[in-house]
Image: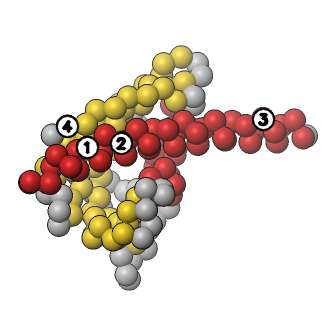
Amino acid sequence: MKVKITTTIKTNENNMWAELQKTSSLRHIASPILIFKPQKGSSIPEKWSLGVEYNFKLLFLGIIPLGNHSIQLVELDKNKKTIKSSEHSKIIRLWTHIITFQKKNNHSIQYTDDVEINAGILTLPIWLFSQLFYRYRQYRWRKFFLDNQSFHRTRSTLR
């Protein structure tokens, strides 16, 4: 099953690309619904690397363990403004996530999460959860950039 959700975010392409490179952005944008913790004995780098499999312990609402979750970036193309990950866990056989964005005007971008899910008999409930989760993530992205704009405006006013 597929999930495709698009929104407008008040930022520019360079800011979005810079944030998508950071592992901390995923962790911030997904929380508190999903918490990504490094598995024991591993650490999370500052930036994602192409082809590296990152293994996390996944927690729902920070308390309910959902098991281990692996993320591997299979495409990281700044020119096409595309990031594609191949993800899986014991429950989820296939989770292909493609993030794309493009300039909408001088002050905003159009951002899309496109996800393909295969979790056997659990595909439908996970697809339903994903419908809500990706809307939440996009809300968090919009809020993140609005908060950062407010912070920078306040700092420049204080100077």
Which disc number belongs to residue 2?
4
Picture coordinates of residue 107 (x, y %)?
59, 22
> What residue is pinned by disc 3?
153
Which disc number belongs to residue 132?
2
Which disc number belongs to residue 128?
1
Q: Is residue 86 above or below residue 37?
A: above
Residue 78 appears in the picture as rendered: yes
Query: Which label sits in the foreground, 4 or 2?
Result: 2
Query: Which label sits in the foreground, 3 or 2?
Result: 2
Tell me the kind of residue under disc 1: Leu
Tell me the kind of residue under disc 3: Arg
Q: Is residue 89 above or below residue 80?
A: below
- Label 3 environment density (alpha carbons within 10 Å; few <14, some 14–19, many ≥20): few
The answer to whether the residues at label 1 and label 2 have Cβ atoms under 8 Å apart is: yes
129 and 83: which is toward the camera: 129
Q: Residue furthest right?
A: 159
